[in-house]
Amino acid sequence: MIVNDIRPLLAPMISILCAVLIFWRGGNAFLRRSFSISAAIVKWVVVFSMLQGSLAGKIYVTELIPFVPGISFLLRVDGLGMFFGMVSSTLWIITTVYAIGYMEGEHARKRFFAFFALCVSTTVGIAFAGNLFTLFVFYEMLTVCTYPLVIHEETPEAMRAGRKYLVYTLTGGSLILFSTALTFYLADTVTFAEPGILSISNGVGLLAAMFAMFMLGFGVKAAIMPLHGWLPSAMVAPTPVSALLHAVAVVKAGVFGITRIIYNIFGVSTLKDMALEGMDVASVLMWAALITIICASLMALMQDGLKKRLAYSTVSQLSYIVLGVSLLTPDGALGGIVHIANQAFMKITMFFVAGAIYKKTHKKNISEMHGIGHKMPLTMATFTIASLGMMGLPPTAGFISKWYLCLGALDAGKMVVVVILLLSSFLNAAYFLPIVYRAYFMKPQDGNLKTDEAHWTLLVPCVICALYVIALGLFADLPFVPLALARGAVTGFFGL
């Protein structure tokens, strides 16, 4: 049931208003913090208020004046949009608290928090975009709003990383824009529909070319190899930005866009018809994801910098999502989509820990972290929980993702996917467990065993997210949790 409602527009507008207020009065620390926290909470309340209706099958819509005949600025909260909107708005509250603590004493805080708010606004806009045009607008706005955060340190290294980020992402955006125009030419619409809007009658060769351009365009932010180069370089940004990039906004916008293209533009039946005609583009995407999972894990093994190791881990983990949605099976899609949330909570925990360690000890490299678990036991306990989740061990959220990915692979008759997922789990253990071992089973280099945790604004977000990692595994089948939301989206995609 479609319901006309102002809330899909209100959700991104709250963060835009927050950014305006910070630009205006953000020089005052109390006001800046108040604006940031208040906007995060109000946004979450607005999004949450649509949750029960969304689970009941309601689709909330806000449509503004059309730009050209057939193309309007459309916001639409369906199952997938609600899923992504809830994840991003929930994590924004936690990340805002962390950022307030982390950025204390840093320069240009007014600019930082204003663009931080704009990034979350555009992310929710992406979640609630009702057509390709609206998605493209918010997708490019996200690129522009993230750039000042990537170059925040304003060092030569940061400026190089920012230029690299723009080259990659704006090139990908150009491919998306061209493919969007071609979609409108073929289908006379760009509005998302659960059966998809393209059909085999549009020509198999042309559809294959369009699919490739869409995947390259969104694949940049999804960090599919070899389109991933910007992501490790962007680790020069402050840790809250790294957390934003890896868990809430940029990379998730990429995999979210891929999911929209597969299920709301092409549709399962069209992609299967293309495979019968010799153009199995979904399998090509699947293999790209499998290669990325393994290669990125091997790259992570070679990194001594903690944030760099986490960055390559993100490249690998994102391809779990791409893999799941490319299998074209209900369980595969469910595993891929729910991993958007599960990976977010696991990875943001790890980046929070990396930032807490740096702020407390000024250490960035794993080789320098002897005995850090003695000095910061609670902080490293949260890192350990997230590591176990990344390995896919029960009862963590990561187990839920891999369980459904394996079921989807078996349903598709692709045993090789199960084998590679198991190999990936071993590789995750190989590059995360040595960090845990070094932290707990080696003495600090200075011989000091005194407990010295980071400030509560850094520690509490780590603890909350680690508890989420456990809760999303233990209570996965409860209503209102990510698995239930993801299941609602999959039901529509496959007509279940």
Image (cartoon, rainbow, N blue to C red):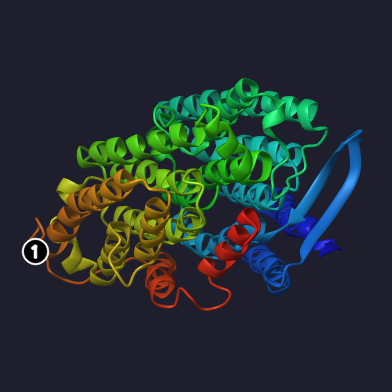
The image position of residue 431, as x and y in percent, is 21, 49
Q: Residue at x 11, y 60 (%)?
A: 444
The image position of residue 304, as x and y in percent, is 21, 41
Would residue 111 be found to the left or right of residue 56 on screen?
A: left
* Mark 1: few/some/many CA within 10 Å (<14, 14-19, 20+): some
Instruction: Please say if 245 is above or below 465.
Output: above
> Type of residue at label 1?
Phe
Instruction: Please say if 470 is above or below 265.
Output: below
Would residue 257 be found to the left or right of residue 320 on screen?
A: right
Instruction: Please say if 293 is above or below 449.
Output: above
Residue located beneath label 1 in the image: 441
> Between 32 and 401, which is closer to the camera in this rendering?
401
Instruction: Using the rendered image of the protein, determine whether residue 28 is visible from the camera's viewpoint.
Output: no
> Between 91 and 208, which is closer to the camera in this rendering?
208
Instruction: Using the rendered image of the protein, determine whether residue 82 is visible from the camera's viewpoint.
Output: yes
Q: Residue at x 32, y 54 (%)?
A: 354
Instruction: Please say if 301 is above or below 337.
Output: above
Quarter occupied by residue 268: top right
Q: Residue at x 81, y 65 (%)?
A: 1
Q: Secondary structure at mark 1?
A: helix
Quarter occupied by residue 90: bottom right
> Between 274 and 83, which is closer to the camera in this rendering?
274
Q: Residue at x 68, y 63 (%)?
A: 39
Q: Residue furthest front?
A: 276
Q: How many marks?
A: 1
The image position of residue 151, as x and y in percent, is 50, 34
Where the C terminus falls, by quadrant? Answer: bottom right
The image position of residue 339, as x and y in percent, is 45, 56
